[in-house]
Amino acid sequence: MTVATIGTFKHEENTTSFSAGEVIFKEGDPGDTMYIVQKGEVDISFEGKLLDSVGPDGVFGEMALVDSQARSASAIAKTECKVVVLDEESFKRHVHRTPFFAVQVMRVLAYRLRRMNEMV
C-alpha cells in the first residue's frame, strides 16, 4: 500500500538509511515515529509472520504514532533503503496541510489490521 501524496515528502530533510537485514524496530518497542519509504523495501512482520512488504511511497510505523502505544509489528529492511522519518509534530503538520494524507494513512491501518486478523 502506498501513499499517493508522497510527492509532498520528496524534499523532506529528516531521512535515514538502513542496510538490508537491519532491524528498524521490533514488535513491542516504544514508537513515536512513522516512516515513508523513498527507496528500497521494508518487510513488516507480526508474530514472526510476514504481514506486508513496503516499497517506495509506502508507509510503516504509523500505528504507534497514531495511538502512542508500543509497536504492534516489526520492521526489517529487506533491501538497502532510505526512509523519511516523521515524528508526531511533522505528521500533524502534514495532515493539516494535506488532509487526504490522513485518509491514506487510515487505509494503510485498515489494510494491516485486516491482515493481522487473518493471521490470528
Image (cartoon, grey):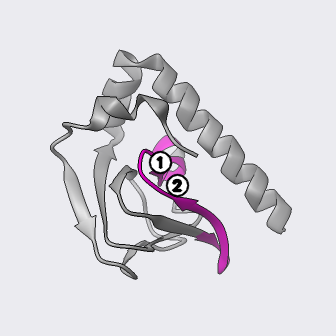
Provide the residue span drawn in magenta: 45-66
Query: Sequence-wise, which precedes: disc 2 or disc 1?
Result: 1
10 Å crowding of disc 1: few (<14), some (14-19), many (20+): many
Q: Quadrant of residue 79?
A: bottom left
Left or right, 117 with reference to 77: right
Q: How many marks?
A: 2
Query: Pointer 1: what residue?
Result: 58
User: 28 or 55, which is in the foreground?
Assistant: 55
Left or right, 97 with reference to 106: left
Query: Pointer 2: what residue?
Result: 69
Residue 58 in the image: state x and y as whole percent. 47, 48
Name the mark on residue 34.
Answer: none
Mark 2 vs 1: CB contact within 8 A: no
Disc 1 residue type?
Answer: Gly
Left or right, 17 with reference to 2: left
Going 37% across and 62% down the picture, which residue do you hit?
40
Above-or-below relation of 27 to 89: below
Disc 2 residue type?
Answer: Gln
User: 81 or 68, which is in the foreground?
Assistant: 81
CA gap, disc 2 to disc 1? Answer: 21 Å
Residue 108 in the image: state x and y as whole percent. 61, 43
Which quadrant, please, contains the C terminus? bottom right
Residue 82, magenta (yes or no): no
